[in-house]
Image (cartoon, rainbow, N blue to C red):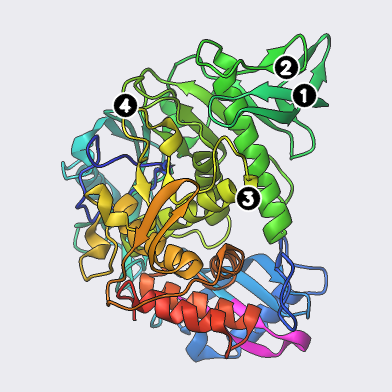
């Protein structure tokens, strides 16, 4: 589960090496450049995927050749010049290799153009477990820094044998799914990997990540909405954006089946009205928070469509849905693989968490899940969170809504106490827990705080170093190496990050890998000798990623 996270003073201790997959908070191209990629869920009809597999198998060193290895294409990105980028999963002797995904790049005419992956060597593990399922299951509930914070932890469903290659030497592992609930009400759907040879817990990964009408929102003023007629009423459902809709969850929380497997989840009651007007701009109307969530979904949909040529979260035109009024005093929001869910806040420090940048943040967890699928732990987890902060912020700028001007503060609209939000990108360490500069300890920090390195890089890339006022808020971004950075602007920076995410990053990408991915993306878009590429390199060095 991906969730928004929290301001350090309220929750989440900052130093954990476990994976957390709760994802809460949380246009035109230059001359000679490649066009924005067009994603497709299925390999194209001209056998681009099959050609990519053949090309990969013809290069054993790149394929990390080993006995019993197979590749399955999952998606293809095609550039305007005919270049393709085919993403694949990997199995060895029938076992999924977690972290073994790869992207094969081919130029026009299917010429070989390299591959992106994090697997460094062939997978060589004994695939017969010496630790049985029952013995491994007893270790799943052993108390550690993660499980201590989850109540009613229980194993559900059948485990599976996998090869876990995330973060180091591949190991045969039992993968268990457990359910439960965190103290603040956020559901838990935790994956635990137990070494099938020595019986140690390798890591844990949380899988919960966080007709014309008009609405009056809490944070964005009066906004236009698309609604759907239903008898004599109108539903808060947009038929023009994949049928995305918004429901009132009635301040309930999810049942166990939904927490564990995402099945049997109740969507809540879709907001309806006898006219085409929703909300009154105040929490006195339960519709108001729904207007914010629906508006945020609409703007984020349009942002990805018009800026990045992506057709919704999943890339295939399918919508999702929002649930507002989740839990009692719930200070968080999350994406769980199918939908966005928002709490009402505690009413003292935080109001409802339905601001525009948070909507963009949560939907962007879905985009990441359906592209690079960055593992929600270690440095890849920090990159996952940074991606949501980056695109949530770019959605805010894209909206150009005078009631919520674009800035690099995350969640400032619902911060009743200080209007400083959960995080900020210009100098992430100002929140007291986030890292502004990469170090060897970054991989051990909670992903909401290790994201600071990626956030700081992006801010420097887009805006540059030094002090300035953006969206009416003071921003001041120092560099970690004392350098001065002149930004390339948000438009070029967001294109570079999106292409790096969708074409070059894989599930185990680290910050060093992100540097390579963004340099490749900048070269594709602007050229190897471009100012944009040189600034990408300088901005990474400015946050100690060399």
Is 489 colored magenta in this rendering? no
Estimate the spatial distance between the alpha carbons at disc 2 and disc 3, rounded to whole Å: 24 Å
Lower sequence index among marks 2 and 1: 1
Residue extent of the magenta highlight = 104-119
User: Mark 3 and mark 1: span between their CA atoms?
Assistant: 21 Å
Q: Is residue 308 visible?
A: yes
Where on the picture, by quarter, is residue 75?
bottom right
Residue under numbered circle 1:
213
Q: What residue is pinned by disc 2?
A: 277
Left or right, 24 with reference to 440: right
- Classify 10 Å Cα crowding around label 2: few (below 14), some (14-19), many (20 and above): many
Q: Is residue 219 left or right of residue 257?
A: right
Which numbered disc, 3 or 1, marks the residue closer to the eye? 3
520 sits left or right of 180 in the view: right
Asked if disc 2 and disc 4 are in contact, CB closer than 8 Å, the reply is no
* Disc 3/disc 4 C-alpha distance (Å): 28 Å
For the N terminus, give its image quadrant: top left
Q: Of the numbered discs in the image, which one, if any, rests on residue 349?
A: 4
- Report helix, strand or loop for mark 2: strand
Q: Quadrant of residue 163?
A: bottom left
Label pair 2/1, CB-CB below 8 angstroms: yes
Residue 398 — which label? 3
Depth order, front residue of 12/186? 12
């Amino acid at each position: 589960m991906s969730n928004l996270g929290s301001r350090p003073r309220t929750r989440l201790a900052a130093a954990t090496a476990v994976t957390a997959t709760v994802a809460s908070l949380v246009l035109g191209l230059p001359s000679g450049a490649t066009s924005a990629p067009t994603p497709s869920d299925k390999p194209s009809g001209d056998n681009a995927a099959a050609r990519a597999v053949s090309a990969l198998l013809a290069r054993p060193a790149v394929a990390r050749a080993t006995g019993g290895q197979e590749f399955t294409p999952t998606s293809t990105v095609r550039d305007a010049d005919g270049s393709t980028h085919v993403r694949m999963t990997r199995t060895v002797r029938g076992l999924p290799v977690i972290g073994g995904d790869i992207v094969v790049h081919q130029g026009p005419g299917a010429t070989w153009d390299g591959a992106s992956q994090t697997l460094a060597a062939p997978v060589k593990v004994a695939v017969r477990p010496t630790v049985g399922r029952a013995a491994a299951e007893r270790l799943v509930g052993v108390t550690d820094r993660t499980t201590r914070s989850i109540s009613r932890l229980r194993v559900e469903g059948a485990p599976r044998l996998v090869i876990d290659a995330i973060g180091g030497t591949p190991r045969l592992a039992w993968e268990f799914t457990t359910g439960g609930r965190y103290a603040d009400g956020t559901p838990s759907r935790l994956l635990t990997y137990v070494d099938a040879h020595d019986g140690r817990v390798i890591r844990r990964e949380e899988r919960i990540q966080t007709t014309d009408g008009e609405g009056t929102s809490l944070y964005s003023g009066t906004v236009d909405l698309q609604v759907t007629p239903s008898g004599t009423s109108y539903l808060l459902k947009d038929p023009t954006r994949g049928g995305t809709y918004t429901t009132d969850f009635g301040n309930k929380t999810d049942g166990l089946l939904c927490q564990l497997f995402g099945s049997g989840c109740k969507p809540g009651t879709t907001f309806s009205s006898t006219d085409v007007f929703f909300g009154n701009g105040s929490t006195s109307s339960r519709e108001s928070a729904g207007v914010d969530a629906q508006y945020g979904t609409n703007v984020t949909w349009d942002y990805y469509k018009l800026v990045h040529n992506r057709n919704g979260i999943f890339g295939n035109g399918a919508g999702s849905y929002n649930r507002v009024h989740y839990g009692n005093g719930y200070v968080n929001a999350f994406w769980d693989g199918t939908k966005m869910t928002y709490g009402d806040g505690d009413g003292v420090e935080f109001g409802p968490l339905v601001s525009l940048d948070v909507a963009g943040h949560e939907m962007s967890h879905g985009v990441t899940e359906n592209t690079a699928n960055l593992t929600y732990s270690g440095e890849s987890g920090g990159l996952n969170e940074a991606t949501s902060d980056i695109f949530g912020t770019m959605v805010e700028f894209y909206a150009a809504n005078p009631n919520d001007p674009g800035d690099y503060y995350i969640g400032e609209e619902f911060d009743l106490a200080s209007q400083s939000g959960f995080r900020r990108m210009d100098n992430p360490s100002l929140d007291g827990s986030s890292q502004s500069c990469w170090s060897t300890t970054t991989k051990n920090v909670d992903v909401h705080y290790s994201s600071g390195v990626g956030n700081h890089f992006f801010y420097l890339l887009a805006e540059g170093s030094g002090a300035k006022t953006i969206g009416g808020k003071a921003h001041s971004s120092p560099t970690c190496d004392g350098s001065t950075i002149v930004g390339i602007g948000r438009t070029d920076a967001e294109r570079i990050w999106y292409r790096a995410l969708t074409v070059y990053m894989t599930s185990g990408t680290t910050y060093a890998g992100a540097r390579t991915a963004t340099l490749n993306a900048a070269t594709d878009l602007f050229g190897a000798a471009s100012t944009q590429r040189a600034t990408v390199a300088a901005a990474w060095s400015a946050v100690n990623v060399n």
